[in-house]
Structure formats: structure tokens, C-alpha cells
Image: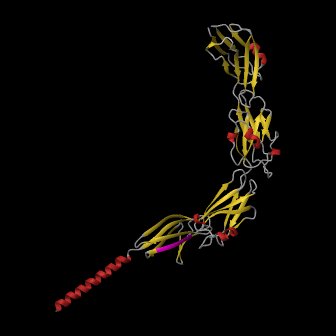
């Protein structure tokens, strides 16, 4: 009996020792939440407790029980961030780098969309939570601009604010107060957002390929009285013609460059162009928008003309079986000096001919000038003719070809 009692006593002591050992092991399974916040002087709150970040933004919440933790991370002049952590036993839950927004919670983003063809803008605003439509329009304020609140999409936590009748190159400010915007929480602080409207400007411009016309597009309506031959010039000087946007649809080859929502104008050089010359067209700051705003700067567009040259001939060089009735045509890429035709063109074998010059002015460049050598007698059959245009042949402005140009052809037998 005594032995039985002694054995039971030893068993009780052993069980008690094991129980104490198990309790100690459970207490060592510590749970904690850590992270790093930008800016560094932030605080982390939950259930009335406040944890401060150190000088490098780190924070640690130690000796936590398993469970769900709703954290609020905040800093002065920054929007709060709300996080939910499901903490397990013995878990060291690291939240990583946490960046606070300069926008007040629940504002997630503000995106500025500029409207082509005017200085007006639309602000697309997204939030972290649903939007209370009934008080939103009362919360948005702007003392210096006309605006409407539209496009409210509660499901996507999004709405837009449209600003209209704005002035070019001007700063505007609007405010959403902190009283109420979303369900559940007020904003941390009022949202104050400023934006600058675009200046009145030319958004695209250049000479139309193959034409003597410069097309420009303005980001708004133009005061046509200011778009004139004083504000638009070309150097070297040449005669200009300004075509207003409402007439461009009827101007051949221009409709393909029209871009919607911008106001387009075309300036055409109606003079003949000099070869090997750079023409620079200038639009200066005296051009105004409909509201009186001046063009933001001087705009320049250049056109380079090719050197004086022969572009083609009839017949072609080395062409055979040419009709004895065929005219001889020399095509130049610019106006010619009529005196050069008699002095610097020769034909072998000799041929009696008279010259005729035809100029095609379609608004294209280079201009096409055709010199017809009309022979009074038919060409001889089975004969090779060689036409030489000497390098001294001049264009209208006194420039020469720079080298002899020769072509040959053979008539039919």
C-alpha cells in the first residue's frame, strides 16, 4: 500500500512539472506587427493605443494576442491609411514600407485632364470609399471658376469635376471640405487642389508635304482680326494668303490633316519660290484667342526648296523608236530665264525649232516649268538626236544649273 502511494505521488509530481513546462512554451510564442512608414514622424493607432515611429520610420507592436487588428496610420498634413491585419499566434507580421499620401483620406487620386480646343479641364477624382452623392456638390467649392460635379460612379468610388469658361494661362484652386465625402469617415483635412491652365498656343504646325502651304492648329478659337499679314510673315519675303478653318474642307489635300477640337488655319505662299532657299514662316505673339489671350510665344516653321534642276524630259534619255512628230520638252523645277532658252540649249543634228514656256502653278512645289522645243520640220527617221542644256542656263533669279545636262533619243526607222 505504501509503495502504491509512493508511486502515485511521483506521478503527480511529474505531471505538474510537465504542465508548467508546457505553459512556459506557450508564453514564448509572441505575436507582433512591424513596419516602416514614410514620413518618419507618423503614428500607428488601434483600440485607443498609439505607437510612435522612430527616427527612421520603424514601428513595432509587441506582445500581441492572435486576432484581427484595425490599424490607422497617420501623420500631420498627410492622408491617413487604414490597414487590417489578421494576426496568427507567434507570427511576426511585417507590413513593409508604408507610404502616406499627401491627399487626405479617403481621396485616392486626382487626375487632371485638359480639354483640347479650350483651356477648360476635367478633374477625375477617385476615393478609397463610397461617395455620398447628396452632400458632394456642397463639399466642392471654388471661388474663381465655373464648375459642375458630374460623372458620379459610387460603385467605382469615382467622380469628376468639370471646370468651364476658364482663362488661358491662369492658376485655379478648388477645395473639398472635410465635413463629409464618404460613408463612415470624414476626410482627414480639406483637399485643396490647384492647377494651371494651358497658355494659348499652336499645338501643331508645319508645311504640308509637297505644297507651299503651312497648316497650324490652335488650342482654342482665334480672334481672326489678329491673324493677318502683320502677325504672320515669311522670310525671304513672299506674298501670302491666309485661309480660315471654315474653308479648309474645300481646299484640296488639306482635309487629311484636320484634327478635331482644334481650330485650324492655313497660310499659303502664293509667290513662286526661289530654288535652294529656306523659307521661314513666323506666327508672332500678337495673335490672340477669342478671350483676348495672346499667343504664348513666337512660332516658326521652315520650308526648304531644292536646287534649280531639270526634273524630266520628253523623250526620255536613250529612248528609241520615237515618233518623228514628237515634241521635245524639258521640264524644270522652277521659273527659267527666257533668254537662256535661246542661248544655252543646242540640238545635234541641228534642228529648226521655236520655244514655248508653260508654267503649272497648282500650289505645289517645286513648280513645274515646261520648255517646249517645237520643230518646224519633222524629225528624220532612224536618227539619234542629242539635246544639251549648258550649265550656264539660268533660273528666273539668276542661278544656273551648275553642270551641263544632256539627253539623247533615236527616232523610229
Where residue 239 appears, as percent x and y from the top left, is 80, 33
Where residue 135 appears, as percent x and y from the top left, is 67, 71
Q: Nearer the viewer, residue 142 or 34?
A: 142
Is residue 335 visible in the rendered image? The answer is no
Q: Nearer the viewer, residue 213 or 197?
A: 213
Q: Is residue 67 above or below residue 279?
A: below
Q: How many marks?
A: 0
Where residue 20 appears, as percent x and y from the top left, is 32, 82
Quarter-wise, where is residue 123 in the image?
A: bottom right
Task: Give me the residue at 38% from left, 74% from top.
Answer: 29
Task: Give me the residue at 65% from left, 12% from top.
Answer: 323
Q: Is residue 76 above or below residue 265?
A: below
Please provide the residue range marked out in magenta.
Answer: 68-73
Q: How is the image coloured?
A: secondary structure
Quarter-wise, where is residue 315 in the image?
A: top right
Task: Give me the residue at 72% from left, 50% from top.
Answer: 117
Q: Is residue 18 above or below residue 293?
A: below
Q: Nearer the viewer, residue 137 or 83?
A: 137
Where residue 25 appears, as percent x and y from the top left, is 34, 76
Magenta stretch secondary structure, dominant: strand
Q: Where, quadrant-wise, is the C terminus in this rendering?
A: top right
Q: Nearer the viewer, residue 70 or 60?
A: 70
As drawn, which residue projects farthest toward the bottom? Answer: 1
Q: Where, quadrant-wise, is the N terminus in this rendering?
A: bottom left
Q: Is residue 24 above or below residue 319?
A: below
Residue 390 covered by magenta stretch: no
Quarter-wise, where is residue 205 in the image?
A: top right
Is residue 13 visible in the rendered image? The answer is yes
Specify whether 2 is left or right of 410. left
Amino acid at each position: 500500500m505504501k509503495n502504491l502511494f509512493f508511486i502515485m505521488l511521483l506521478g503527480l509530481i511529474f505531471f505538474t512539472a510537465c504542465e508548467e513546462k508546457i505553459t512556459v512554451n506557450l508564453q514564448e510564442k509572441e505575436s507582433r506587427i512591424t513596419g516602416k512608414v514614410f514620413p518618419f514622424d507618423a503614428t500607428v493607432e488601434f483600440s485607443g493605443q498609439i505607437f510612435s515611429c522612430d527616427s527612421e520610420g520603424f514601428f513595432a507592436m509587441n506582445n500581441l494576442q492572435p486576432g484581427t487588428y484595425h490599424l490607422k496610420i497617420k501623420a500631420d498634413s498627410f492622408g491617413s491609411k487604414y490597414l487590417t491585419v489578421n494576426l496568427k499566434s507567434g507570427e511576426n507580421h511585417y507590413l513593409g514600407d508604408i507610404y502616406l499620401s499627401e491627399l487626405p483620406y479617403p481621396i485616392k487620386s486626382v487626375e487632371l485632364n485638359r480639354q483640347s480646343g479650350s483651356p477648360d479641364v476635367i478633374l477625375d477624382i477617385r476615393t478609397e470609399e463610397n461617395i455620398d452623392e447628396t452632400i458632394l456638390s456642397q463639399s466642392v467649392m471654388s471661388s474663381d471658376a465655373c464648375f459642375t460635379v458630374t460623372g458620379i460612379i459610387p460603385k467605382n468610388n469615382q467622380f469628376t469635376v468639370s471646370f468651364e469658361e476658364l482663362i488661358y494661362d491662369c492658376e485655379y484652386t478648388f477645395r473639398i471640405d472635410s465635413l463629409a465625402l464618404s460613408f463612415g469617415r470624414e476626410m482627414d483635412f480639406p483637399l485643396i487642389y490647384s492647377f494651371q491652365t494651358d497658355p494659348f498656343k499652336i499645338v501643331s504646325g508645319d508645311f504640308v508635304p509637297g505644297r507651299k502651304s503651312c497648316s497650324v492648329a490652335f488650342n482654342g478659337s482665334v480672334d481672326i482680326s489678329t491673324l493677318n499679314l502683320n502677325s504672320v510673315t515669311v522670310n525671304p519675303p513672299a506674298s501670302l494668303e491666309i485661309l480660315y478653318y471654315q474653308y479648309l474642307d474645300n481646299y484640296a489635300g488639306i482635309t487629311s490633316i484636320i484634327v478635331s477640337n482644334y481650330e485650324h488655319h492655313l497660310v499659303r505662299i502664293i509667290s513662286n519660290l526661289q530654288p535652294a532657299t529656306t523659307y521661314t514662316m513666323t506666327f508672332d505673339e500678337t495673335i490672340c484667342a477669342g478671350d483676348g489671350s495672346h499667343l504664348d510665344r513666337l512660332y516658326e516653321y521652315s520650308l526648304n526648296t531644292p536646287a534649280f534642276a531639270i526634273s524630266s524630259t520628253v523623250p526620255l534619255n536613250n529612248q528609241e523608236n520615237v515618233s518623228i512628230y514628237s515634241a521635245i520638252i524639258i521640264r524644270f523645277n522652277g521659273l527659267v530665264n527666257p533668254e537662256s532658252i535661246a542661248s544655252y540649249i543646242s540640238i545635234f543634228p541641228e534642228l529648226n525649232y521655236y520655244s514655248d514656256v508653260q508654267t503649272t502653278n497648282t500650289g505645289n512645289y517645286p513648280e513645274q516649268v515646261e520648255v517646249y522645243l517645237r520643230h518646224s520640220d519633222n524629225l528624220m527617221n532612224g536618227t539619234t538626236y542629242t539635246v544639251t542644256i549648258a550649265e550656264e542656263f539660268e533660273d528666273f533669279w539668276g542661278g544656273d544649273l551648275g553642270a551641263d545636262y544632256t539627253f539623247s533619243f533615236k527616232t523610229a526607222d
